[in-house]
Image (cartoon, helix red, strand yellow):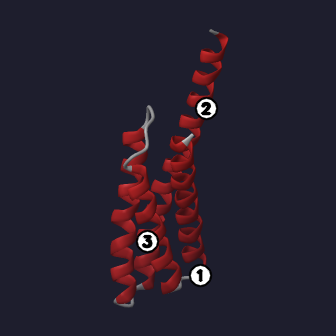
Amino acid sequence: MVRKGKKLIADFFMLMALTTSVSYIAHPNIYELITAVTLNLVATILKIGTRGILNIEYLATSIVADFHLIPALVVAQMGDLEESVSLVWGAVVANIVSIVIMIIEAIMSSLTEEDEEEF
């Protein structure tokens, strides 16, 4: 049960990072970008301990998003919002892939639990 709780928290932060990044794209505000970076970093840290069939891919997508969001924050601080938004788009794509992996993992886990209950 503890494992599911940790996965729930990691998934929550991943979804929050995605939605905050999209919010930044819609209305560039440095505070939203700082929030998106923070949420994504927390999600990345929480994903380090998760277990599953696709956990490496799940973690990799979060790291890719970090590598887009952190430079986006630096670029935004320098005043180039257009370039910053472009970098955040990359993070959004990585986070969407992460969400797809999360859904696949949930489906696979559900199927595995059903097979175990039959025996």
Marks 1, 3: nearer the viewer: 3
Q: Mark 1 points at which residue?
A: 27
Q: Is residue 118 left or right of residue 89?
A: right
Crowding near pointer 2: few (<14 within 10 Å), some, many (20+)?
Answer: few
Q: Which amino acid does label 2 sit on?
A: Ile
Crowding near pointer 3: few (<14 within 10 Å), some, many (20+)?
Answer: many
Secondary structure at badge 3 equals helix
Viewer-closest of 99 and 87 = 99
Secondary structure at badge 2 equals helix
Q: Mark 2 to mark 1: distance in Å?
A: 34 Å
Q: Residue at x 47, y 75 (%)?
A: 85
Q: What residue type is labelled 3?
A: Val
Image position, residue 38 (x, y; %): 44, 72
Q: Which residue is drawn at 43% across and 45% down?
A: 58
**Marked residue nearer the N-terminal end (2 or 3):** 3
Q: Mark 2 to mark 3: distance in Å?
A: 28 Å
Q: Mark 1 to mark 3: distance in Å?
A: 16 Å
Q: Are marks 1 and 3 in contact (CB under 8 Å)?
A: no
Q: Name the residue under label 3.
A: 37
Q: Which residue is drawn at 45% across and 35% down?
A: 52
Q: Is residue 33 left or right of residue 106?
A: left
Tag of residue 98: none
Q: What residue type is labelled 1?
A: His
Q: Farthest top residue? A: 119
Q: Mark 2 points at which residue?
A: 107
Image position, residue 57 (x, y; %): 39, 42
Q: Which image quadrant is residue 1 in?
A: top right
Q: Which image quadrant is residue 75 in?
A: bottom left
